[in-house]
Amino acid sequence: MTVPSTKASPPAARRRRKNDPESVRADILAVATREFSEKGLSGARIDEIAEKTRASKRMIYYYFNDKETLYLHTLEAAYQKVRLQEAELDLDHLTPLEALSRLVRFTFCHHATNPDFIRLVMIENIHHGRFLAQSELIQSLNAGVIDVLTNVYIRGVEEGCFREGLDPRELHWLISALSFFNVSNQHTFSLIFDWHQAAPENQQKLEDHVTDMVLRYVRVDEEPSKS
Amino acid sequence: MTVPSTKASPPAARRRRKNDPESVRADILAVATREFSEKGLSGARIDEIAEKTRASKRMIYYYFNDKETLYLHTLEAAYQKVRLQEAELDLDHLTPLEALSRLVRFTFCHHATNPDFIRLVMIENIHHGRFLAQSELIQSLNAGVIDVLTNVYIRGVEEGCFREGLDPRELHWLISALSFFNVSNQHTFSLIFDWHQAAPENQQKLEDHVTDMVLRYVRVDEEPSKS
DNA sequence: TGAACAATGTACGAAATGGTACGTTCAGTC
DNA sequence: GACTGAACGTACCATTTCGTACATTGTTCA
């Protein structure tokens, strides 16, 4: 009763209390993200996650029921974070060409700066998307991703700078593929071709090439005239 | 001495003998490939590999020293198999455009029909290419892969159908990225965008798009004239 | 204040798992 | 035909690893 400023406001008063479930949960999730993305589902160790956490192993099983559930929550959190970042993108005030270019560069840079997310997706694919299939959350989150691209594309076609007949979903596939591969296969590619792909100058080159490639694919053909 | 037709020819007479080291080794490697590519290094179980083999667990440790060595041999065998298939490609008698098109389609199809290999490479990347770095074999194998592409590209530039200034290694990167992603991220992509990517008609579409994309990127610009 | 429930720590159990000790059989050689 | 080393089987060990039982502390509300 004599406690400073806490009166029926549990979520706001996080300082004075000893028990802080939300932060414990968040802490576990953060550590789990690092561990799972680094070592995979079977490679990550619950005990090691527990050690690196302020909490104890008991807490992991308290908030998340078992290893696989923890992994699923990790995956969901990662997707949510991505979507939040994507939502900040504002393309409506740009010309279609600029907007598409911006979108490609954003995707490329985003993936490059979020290797944890990429690795989790790789790992999830190794598991045949078994966990993603369980998550309605993720699937609903991703519903609107294509919409942004669709809008840009339609505007481009209407303005005559993009050629017709392309499927925005396939366009998204192309952009994703190039941006994803840049992170996912960096190690093997660098080793095999003795090329420091992660070097800033090479990353810049790749970003330019990827952007160029997508634009060339979408732009109308510059053929002077037919016959 | 009364044995049928075996006289100082151990490698040829494989039938009558009870011990058949080569085939045991090959069998182990084949099973290990399936297991590792399916479940990863940490996910695969030596006991399970042993069970699925005609041999026993003891034999795995007899021929390969430990789990990681077995994994490394698996990886090396997979790369070797790929290189053998690639070597069959004969592009010299084609025009540069046809040759490049052929090369892209070959890569796309090859990856699509060898998911085990793709998955092993994914897994190896999860391990930061740690094992590939140990293998001089693989790195030497891959030396000549770029050469084929380089030849085609140079021919194309000389004949005036490819634009100058592109790096064959980066070109290879683009082709690999699109072909690789098609397999590596099939599960998550199909789920998220509710699109049966593995369906033959969609695979055909993607193959066409990928080929088209690469060709559009490499072809000379069709601009009528400057100013 | 004290009952009720949420949050947390400690210690432990049971199964899985990589790896090995030890013995046996096979195949070529003197 | 005895000897030797390669090839192979069985049983086992030590450790790791997921998960839980149980006790304890914190928090809220009547």
Image (spheres, coloured by chain):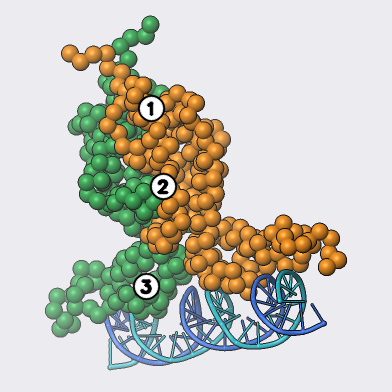
Chain colours: A orange, B green, C blue, D cyan
Asked if B96 appears above or below B55 in the picture, the reply is above
Asked if A205 appears above or below A73 in the picture, the reply is above
Q: Secondary structure at mark 2?
A: helix
Q: Which mark, by number, is residue B49?
A: 3
Q: Nearer the viewer, residue D10 or A227?
A: A227
Instruction: Provide the chain ID for the residue under circle 2.
Output: A
- Depth check, mark 3 against mark 2: the one in front is 2
| Disc 1 to disc 2: CB gap under 8 Å | no
Q: Amino acid at mark 1?
A: Arg
Question: Share a chain, discs 1 and 2?
Answer: yes
Q: Amino acid at mark 2?
A: Ala
Query: What percent of the width, then of the height, locates residue C23?
Result: 41, 92
Q: Amino acid at mark 3?
A: Ile
Instruction: Provide the chain ID for the residue under circle 3.
Output: B
Q: Which mark, by number, is residue B151?
A: none
Circle 2 residue: A143
Q: Which residue is depicted at the point 43% across and 43% down?
A: A145
Q: Nearer the viewer, residue B93 or A95?
A: A95
Sequence order check: which comes first, mark 1 or mark 2? 2
The answer to whether any part of residue A78 appears in the image is yes
- Depth check, mark 3 against mark 1: the one in front is 1
Neighbour class for label 3 at 10 Å: few (<14), some, many (≥20)?
Answer: many
Circle 1 residue: A155
| Disc 3 to disc 2: CB gap under 8 Å | no
| Picture quarter with the C terminus of chain A | top left
Q: Secondary structure at mark 1?
A: helix
Query: What percent of the width, then of the height, locates residue A21?
Result: 67, 65
